[in-house]
Image: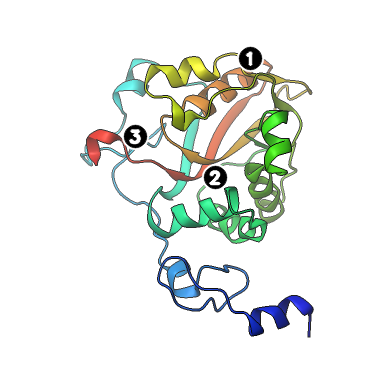
């Protein structure tokens, strides 16, 4: 019996959502029941950026109607709440890297277009040293294996350190990431899939897509685990 399995039997972890004992190491410390309760968002949304909308008759949001974004479309699995939010936090801040595999499996079931490469939204080198891993790179690697598409982890770099997007609001988010990313490898003519964990306003993926297209990418599609509900819809 593997030592890790023995430890799980002797010291079973407790699900942080419902308090039950964890019963599957793949999702641990979340239990299977809570994991299976993660809901895929199927409500009304903008057909390009994916922002949830109030009416099913709204096909495009106001922002996308005013001007086409640099990405082709944003796909995401669910709303940033509940068990999905907890799972993302456990991976991102709790360092439970094995959760990247089941989380990426959620994305594998989305109707993603055919692409030639997968790129994670990069971290600045200082933040990467502090965290020791990039959660979007872990998700992107597992997703690439599932889709049989190569991960291109170092083509897009974050050259300038920025404030966490959660610390700024509104238009400041756009200013915060402007000019922060740079393409360092050839991606000319490629259809790319840009992977993020959570999308709030979309400022970060918009800036990443802009520099990728400027560097010659044929198209950029964005995929994320979750999207925050806009304040007006809460």
Q: Quick one: label 3, few (<14), some, or many (20+) residues within 10 Å?
A: many
Q: Is residue 4 above or below residue 222?
A: below
Say whether residue 197 is left or right of residue 54.
right
Say whether residue 67 is left or right of residue 143.
left
Label 2, on which residue? 112
Nearer to us in this view, 170 or 120:
170
SS state under label 1 = helix
Residue 8 at least partly seen: yes
Q: Is residue 11 above or below residue 109?
A: below
Say whether residue 150 is left or right of residue 180.
right
- Measuring from the top left, give residue 209's x and y in whole percent: 57, 24
Label 1, on which residue? 214
- Measuring from the top left, give residue 40's x and y in whole percent: 40, 56
- The quadrant the C terminus occupies is top left
Label 3, on which residue? 46
SS state under label 3 = loop
Q: Quick one: label 1, few (<14), some, or many (20+) residues within 10 Å?
A: few
């Amino acid at each position: 019996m593997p030592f890790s399995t023995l430890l799980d039997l002797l010291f079973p972890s407790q699900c942080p959502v419902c308090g039950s004992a964890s019963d599957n190491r793949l999702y641990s410390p979340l239990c299977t029941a809570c994991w299976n309760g993660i809901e895929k968002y199927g409500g009304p949304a903008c057909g390009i950026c994916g922002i949830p909308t109030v009416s099913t008759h709204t096909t495009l949001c106001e922002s996308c109607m005013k001007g086409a974004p640099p990405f082709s479309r944003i796909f995401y699995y669910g709303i940033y709440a509940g068990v999905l939010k907890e799972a993302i936090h456990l991976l991102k801040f709790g360092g439970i890297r094995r959760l990247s595999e089941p989380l990426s499996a959620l994305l594998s079931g989305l109707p993603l277009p055919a692409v030639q490469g997968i790129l994670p939204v990069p971290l600045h080198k200082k933040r990467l040293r502090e965290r020791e891993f990039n959660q979007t790179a872990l998700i992107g690697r597992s997703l690439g294996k599932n889709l049989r598409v190569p991960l291109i982890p170092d083509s897009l770099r974050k050259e300038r350190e920025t404030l966490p997007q959660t610390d700024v609001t509104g238009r400041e988010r756009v200013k915060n990431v402007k000019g922060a990313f740079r393409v360092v490898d050839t991606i000319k003519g490629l259809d790319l899939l840009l992977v993020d964990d959570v999308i709030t306003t979309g400022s970060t993926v918009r800036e990443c897509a802009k520099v990728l297209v400027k560097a010659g990418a044929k198209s950029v599609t964005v995929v994320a685990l979750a999207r925050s509900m806009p304040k007006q819809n809460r």
